[in-house]
Amino acid sequence: MSKAEIAAESGSGRTGASGEETPVFLSLLPARPGERRFAFAVMAVSLAVFVALAPFAKVQLPRLDAFIPLYQSALVISHLIIAVLLFGQFSIVRTRGLLILASAYLFTTLMVVAHTLSFPGLFAPGGLLGSGAQTTAWLYMIWHGGFSLLVIGYALFNGAKIDAPPNQIITFSVIVVAAVVAVVMALTSAGQDWLPAIMDGDRYTPMMSVVVLAVWLIGLFALLLLWRRKADTALDLWLVVVVGAWLLDVALAAVFNGGRFDLGFYAGRIYGLLASGTVLLVLLLETRALYVRHALELQQTNQALRESKARLRQLNETLEQRVQERTQRLEEEAAERERMEAALRDVQKLEAIGRMTGGIAHDFNNLLAVIIGNVDELMERFRDRPDMESLLAINHAAERGARLIRQLMTFSRNKPLKTDTIDLKQRARDMGSFLTQSLRGDIRLVFDWPEDLWPVRCDGDELDLAMVNLCVNARDAMPDGGLVRIAGRNIAAIEKQEPSLGLAGDYVQLSLSDTGHGIAGDDLKRVFEPFFTTKEIGKGTGLGLCQVYGFCQQAGGRAMVESVEGQGTTVTLYLPRAVVETDAPSVPNSGTARRGRGRVLLVEDDDAVAAMATRMLTMLGYESHRARDARTALALLLGGQQFDVLFSDIVMPGGMSGQELAQKVRSHFPALPILLASGIVYAAAEVDRQGFDIIAKPYRADALADALERVIRESYSRQRNRA
């Protein structure tokens, strides 16, 4: 667990501007660069003084009996205060390392007391507590070695957290430390005969060097551990200073000196006193800063409490006003929700009508396919006969019916989607004269395009048809003449500017406005319904605006109508922005039907359509064999019958569609050309992705000839590429 986590869990931090907990204790605060420089300066000065004093450590000085009690008393007071402060911090932070360090200072406090009482000649010639000649020296060594061992424990276990109640842990630690000191006192006094002699009067024995080396190595190991931790907290940094001073203390007082009361004896103890005083000073300054910080925080809290009470009074005083405002907002939200629900019902109604219309269009397509196919055959047969005009009239009526079916399929969104990238300004220039002709001479047509108008992604033919339908509606709405304005506008991130549309991304707004008589409010809700019209009987089919609606929905956009009676109407189309460059418009191939040859497997469930297709294939020079369903056709192919082309309807009964048949045939006979046909292509995008060619019903002989020639040519091309 990191120190930041410990601070956050223990409450030993204060909340900063970012909302995170900031440590406030010396044991958690990171060491600042200034503190590091100061600590290293203290260590450098201590080392310099040590180097200067070491050569003179054995210089004998007068015995000052008052020095020992003064020195020991100062140590006891400073170490006891440090222990109390560290135990206090542990009760909040509750880390194992801080408990060990607090116990270390308590241990040195009790050891100093024992050392003082046992010092010979201070309270008694031989010392108190039954001490002997070796007791005081051994207590000094165990005191310094024990502190270093506990510092090692602090360095190793500082990150661990203790979950037990802190008061119990502190009490237990005090008892354990006191027991250890009592055992050490008993060992060095009553059991001193078991210990090797390290003092000979006031001088050291050779064994002292071994003991001092062991104590000094323990302290050096503690210093290295702290240094390896890179002194990441302020407490770690000052512990490095303390342990370094203690090493110099032991070196002067027990290594370089000769015995008691020489220069090393006095200087070493002064080092120890300064080391403990440094930590005590830092802890006291930290406690003062913590007190000041908490006092300021309390003052700020009280100020915030007063401000909160003032705001509460103000809120209570304005409660009625806020309730009224909230009620008004709720009413507005309820009204908006009702409007959205009404719009959703309208969309669902149009969707239902669209599905029904799509089914009707499918059946009519099959009827028109028979009519147009037979008319083509008769026109080819009786090209020079006088009754050709009757056939032309039938042909004209069939084409008109095909256009109506096309509009119905667009509304129902069941027409195959052809996506083009359209430059609206160029499209307007290309269609300008045609749109003008769809109006009258007393109506002026105006275009308003921005220079940076984006291209759009939609079906170009359907866009042309939609613009013609809108212009015709505008013309009929202005019997006395007027103005038609076609304008475009870029809308980036439409979900932010027009959230009610339910669209997202970049769109182009294409609007057509007129100055006609407008549309009544009740009629405005129904303008997109098929066969609904406000025109006189015989002047409109009611499919113009429903084609516009279906075209926009199919393109991934929306169509909206706004109108004011007596002022005019604006129809707005939202079309998705294209992300590719505008392509040049393709020119359709035209010409008379070309004759081919080969054997065609015709798959068609409708008898009338099948008969018409058979005659048309015969007229084009193909031999045909009909299968009523996809399973029969697949059985013929798998049975070994040879065909040059598969020509199949898509929507058929029997459990297998024309698309599924095409997939199976391609897997078994990859070289066989395949052409699919349908009056309503539900899976046009999927069929196109799979690489199958489609011809839309109703089709003419020349279109069928082109389609068959294309699929045969593409099949031969694929075979050559494989070869």
Image (cartoon, rainbow, N blue to C red):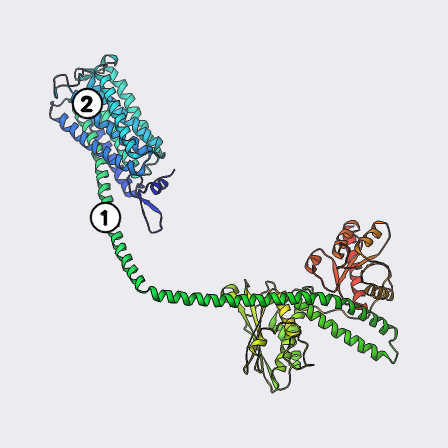
Quarter location, residue 325: bottom left
Relative height, residue 666 to residue 216 (above, below): below
Q: Number of numbered discs present? A: 2
Q: Picture quarter containing residue 175? A: top left
1 and 2 marks in contact (CB < 8 Å): no
Q: Is 16 drawn above or below residue 707 in the view shown? A: above
Closer to the camera: disc 1 or disc 2? 1
Type of amino acid at the residue the image marks with label 2 = His
- Residue that label 2 marks: 115
Q: Secondary structure at mark 2?
A: helix
Name the mark on residue 83.
Answer: none
Q: Amino acid at mark 1?
A: Ala
In percent of width and height, residue 110 lies at 21, 26
- Mark 1: few/some/many CA within 10 Å (<14, 14-19, 20+): few
Tell me how far mark 1 sits from mark 2, CA to CA. Answer: 41 Å
Q: Is residue 10 visible?
A: yes
From where the camera sits, is residue 699 visible? no
- Helix or strand or loop: what does disc 1 sit on? helix
Vertical arrangement, residue 582 with respect to residue 95, above or below: below
What residue does disc 1 label? 295
**Position in image of residue 182 (x %, y %):** 23, 21
Q: Earlier in the sequence, mark 1 or mark 2?
A: 2
Tell me residue 50's x, y (percent).
22, 29
Residue at image x 75%, y 68%? 364
Residue 429: give x, y in percent of width and height.
63, 76
Q: Is residue 691 left or right of residue 252?
A: right
